[in-house]
Amino acid sequence: MSPLTKKIVSLVIPFYNEAVGVEDFFVVVNQALVASYDSYDFEFVCVNDGSSDETLVKLREQAQLYPQIVIVDLSRNFGKEAALTAGIDIACGDAIIPIDSDLQDPPELIVDMLKAWEEGYEVVLAKRSDRRTDSFLKRSTALWFYRTHNAVSKPSIPENVGDFRLMDRCVITALQQMPEQQRFMKGLFAWVGFKTTTIEYSRQQRHAGDSKFSGWKLWNFAIEGITSFSIAPLKLWTYIGGLGALVAMFYALYIVFSTLILGVEVPGYASLLVTIIFFGSLQLLSIGILGEYIGRIYMEAKRRPIYIVREVFRNKED
Ligand code: UDP
Ligand code: MG
């Protein structure tokens, strides 16, 4: 294949305090891809998501060794979703592959992804066939999340598929038409559709450093996913309210008749209190859910940029 017709493949790699693993990452990626260098031009778009350690310095060092590296330095930590968006916006590949920088997504799989892409698939998903490296708690909460999300949202997101996937340029063009600020990438990726196939892999241990996602962060991420793609939690209250009113109506009838027949009954303090507390809490809960959505409308309404780039550092002369 002549160099002129070579397709460009961009890896988009978010880095947040990953200094200890930077060097190994590129060694492993280079090893996995070297055989494909004849057929494709690779570009490694590394997004430094406001790291407070030596990540940027290490990335710059690596850029001396690997001319494929492009560094996008964000002005602060914007979170993985924003970092991915920044990388995807700057990447110029015919295919784009978001991949974690901790080697939990095996780069060897990229070769298989490219094969499937050449067969005509526009999206090649990498599905974790086994999550043994994740804790029991993470596995079960992930399962719970996928079930709940897919029960209430359309389109459903494929279970155990992370951001690691290949996307054709046509998918990226579609993705860039979605201007929302709160970006649940897995959901956005699924929303655009396109011809999709799946490759299975087994999830590795983190190569170095620690996970950046605590339980609380994951919980918020799950809420973000559901509220971004479904209004079922809002609608639910119409039915709960309706049901409550129906029950109250029958109960009122019962009280009227029993009062007429049996006379006035004085005790009832406990049941009254329980009912008030129960419905009071239900109302607070529903207001809380309303608040979740209003908060999101407020954040969206500001139309702030999703990320701010301090500097883009390119090695290669185009
Ligand atoms: N990451 C990021 N910004 C953040 C948090 C994480 O760019 O605010 C990157 C991180 O450097 C890694 C990827 O997102 O490349 C996945 O993070 P992590 O491995 O901590 O998540 P986990 O695999 O535990 O779900
Ligand atoms: Mg990880």
Image (cartoon, helix red, strand yellow):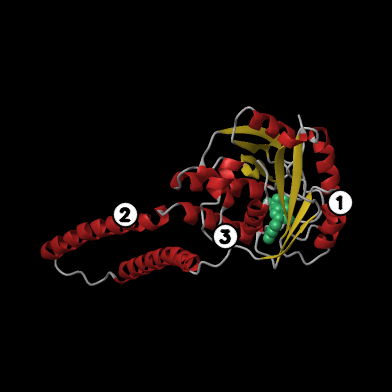
Residue beneath disc 1: 23
Secondary element at image label 3: helix
Of tags 1 and 2, the one toward the viewer is: 1
| Residue 185: x %, y % from top left | 58, 51
Residue at x 74%, y 33% (from the top left corner): 111
Q: Residues within 10 Å of mark 1 (few under 14, many from 20)?
A: some
Residue furthest top as drawn: 119
Residue beneath disc 2: 239
| Left or right: 178, with 86 as reference point | left
Residue beneath disc 3: 220
Q: Earlier in the sequence, mark 1 or mark 3?
A: 1
Of tags 3 and 2, the one toward the viewer is: 3
**Cβ–Cβ under 8 Å for marks 3 and 2:** no
* Nearer to the camera, 207 or 34: 34
Amino acid type, mark 2:
Tyr
Tell me if I can see residue 167 in this picture: yes
| Residue 170: x %, y % from top left | 57, 41
